[in-house]
Amino acid sequence: MAEVKVPSRSRQVANRRRPGLMIAIVGFSVAGMIGLVILMFGGVSGVEFSPTHFQSRRFTVMEIPWLKIQISPIQRTSNTLGTSQYLVAQSLISSPKGPPIEWHLVELSRGAMQISPADAKLLVDQLELRRDSTSGSNEFWEDWSVKEQAKAKVLWPIVQKLAIRELYILLPKIFTIALDAKDDAALRQSIDEYLRTSYRELVTEMRSTGRTELADELLAEAILDYPDDAKLQELR
């Protein structure tokens, strides 16, 4: 009769441990791969702008890629621009007491993806605009506001109002009008003409694309600004 070999006790223990060891190795490998993916693609960063205080800030946060589940606290750092500080100091914009509550997205990037600009960037780009000159301030619109004080008192409250309403799309033309206007009266007239027309066009476009509620809100704001505009009244 053939001899039956019985595995030793140590070999039996080793055989029982081997599956557990393999599972642990696989688990660590998977965890490492997930961690690497999160490090490569889970980083989110961007810039926000407060239209009520003309402050800006940068933020960073980690999230699970594609699922967009936040896994780390949001880190924020102030990034307020020099032109903004001047506008607040000179009361060219109205800044309420207390910290900003409302923030609009300027730009956002996720992982290795290209930075995606948002509407507020149309204003922030202007506030960051610098001039190639050693005289006066290097900030273009700060320098312009110092030299064109009467026009600045017309321009900036309107810019802030449009920013609060998230109508950043109208600002590039507003800045062009400001540069071309002869004086503050001409600037006011040109901006009013442009905004009256733009409000009517935006309300009509929003309604045609089914954004009725948003169109009604904008129309109410436009009529508040221009109650004597018969064409706006007709859109009610």
Image (cartoon, rainbow, N blue to C red):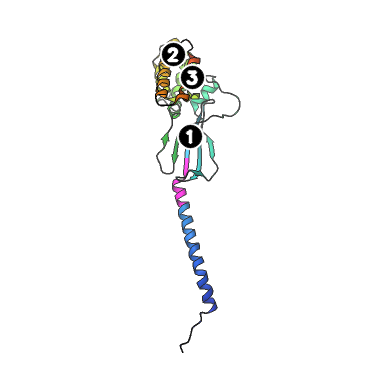
Few, some or many C-alpha atoms within 10 Å of disc 3 (few <14, some 14-19, many ≥20)?
some
Above-or-below relation of 169 to 235: below
**Residue placed under numbered mark 1 in the picture:** 47
Describe the element under mark 2 as helix, strand or loop. Answer: helix
Amino acid at the residue labelled 1: Val
**Residue placed under numbered mark 3 in the picture:** 156
Q: Main secondary structure of the magenta part?
A: helix
Question: Closest to the observer: 171 or 135?
Answer: 171
Residue 38 in the image, given as x and y percentages of width and height: 47, 48
Q: Residue at x 44, y 14 (%)?
A: 232
Mark 3 / mark 1, whichever is N-terminal = 1
Amino acid at the residue labelled 2: Glu
Q: Are marks 3 and 1 in contact (CB under 8 Å)?
A: no
Describe the element under mark 3 as helix, strand or loop. Answer: helix
Is residue 143 a member of the stretch shown in magenta?
no
Tag on residue 234?
2
Question: Closest to the observer: 163 or 75?
Answer: 163
Please report the bounds of the magenta region as a residue range. Answer: 35-44
Separation of residues labelled 3 and 2 (CA atoms)? 29 Å
Q: Nearer the viewer, mark 1 or mark 2?
A: 2
